[in-house]
Image (tube, rainbow, N blue to C red):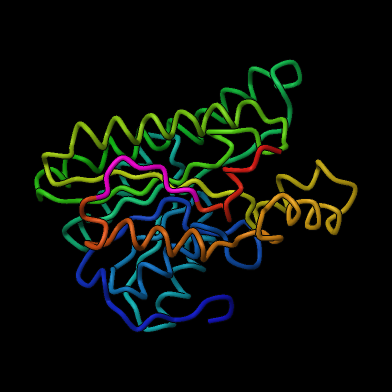
Amino acid sequence: MAGAEVSTSRRLEGRVALVFGAGSVGDGWGNGKAAAVAYARQGARVVAIDREAQAADITRDVIAGEGHDAIAVAADVTRWTDVQQAVAAAIETYGRIDILHNNVGITSQGGPVETTEEVWDRVMAVNVKSMFLTCKAVLPTMEAQGSGAIVNIGALGGVRWTGYAYCAYAASKGAVNSLTQSVALQYAARGIRANCILPGVMDTPHIYQQISGFYDNTQAMVEARNRLSPTGRMGDGWDVANAAVFLASDEARYINGVELLVDGGMHVRCN
């Protein structure tokens, strides 16, 4: 599969992974699509969930084409009934839920003055409420099993300025960190871990649709974002996916409530 080395290990054998936001908004590998495929390659059975049914189907087909087990579900994660139905489909098909991966997120441009109330509410609903709803729906199953791993996708922008004025997005990602820590501590003694991945500047289909408006053209965007990283290049969906596999695996069994920065070191820069 282009874009990533195919691992031969099976660290997640027999487990079931729910990936909300498993589709990609365009050609290539978004964080959610790469994570869903990475989980499958490690032995997990995957429930690929996306608001766009076709996007979820594409991810499922990639997984099935590699000989792994997956189903696709269309759901809007800001709607409680949709989330419940997606979780029910997972239980009906596979009988358990071992990994909850929350990848859904949107950006918005502008500071407090430029951001409308409607945009603020929409960003909070998609980026934060969605994770609250999925945790609400999945945690009872994980608690009954006595085990589970939650991987929430936050952002470097939730802990520091990254060069973009998007106050709603930054605030929402900060809230994701706090939600993750709250769940991690409440459920730690019940065999459930919750961790958060904070990507930095990433080269995914998402940026070409939602961030390109900051720049004169695509080339200018790519060059500017590459310069932001100490490595001289953006990361990609596989960097996030590999971190997610680790956090979901038994290798991370004593890692709980962390914010894992996947940003090439950008978080320690002063500029």
Query: Above or below — where is 151 with respect to 112?
Result: below
Look at the image and give the residue range highlighted in magenta: 255-261
> Toward the viewer: 74 or 252?
252
Q: Is residue 91 magenta?
A: no
Which image quadrant is residue 213 in?
A: top right
Question: What x and y, as percent, mark residue 222?
Answer: 78, 57
Residue 262 lies left or right of residue 178; in this view the side is right
Residue 56 lies left or right of residue 19; in this view the side is right
Q: Is residue 260 magenta?
A: yes
Residue in the image at 61% along x and 47% along y: 266
> Toward the viewer: 164 or 138?
164
Question: What x and y, as percent, mark residue 156?
Answer: 56, 41
The quadrant the C terminus occupies is: top right
Which image quadrant is residue 158 in?
A: top right
Question: What is the total number of numbered labels drawn onto the structure image?
Answer: 0
Residue in the image at 63% along x and 38% along y: 107
Residue 116 lies left or right of residue 21; in this view the side is right
Question: What x and y, as percent, mark residue 199?
Answer: 54, 49
Which residue ends up furthest to the right in the rendered image? 216
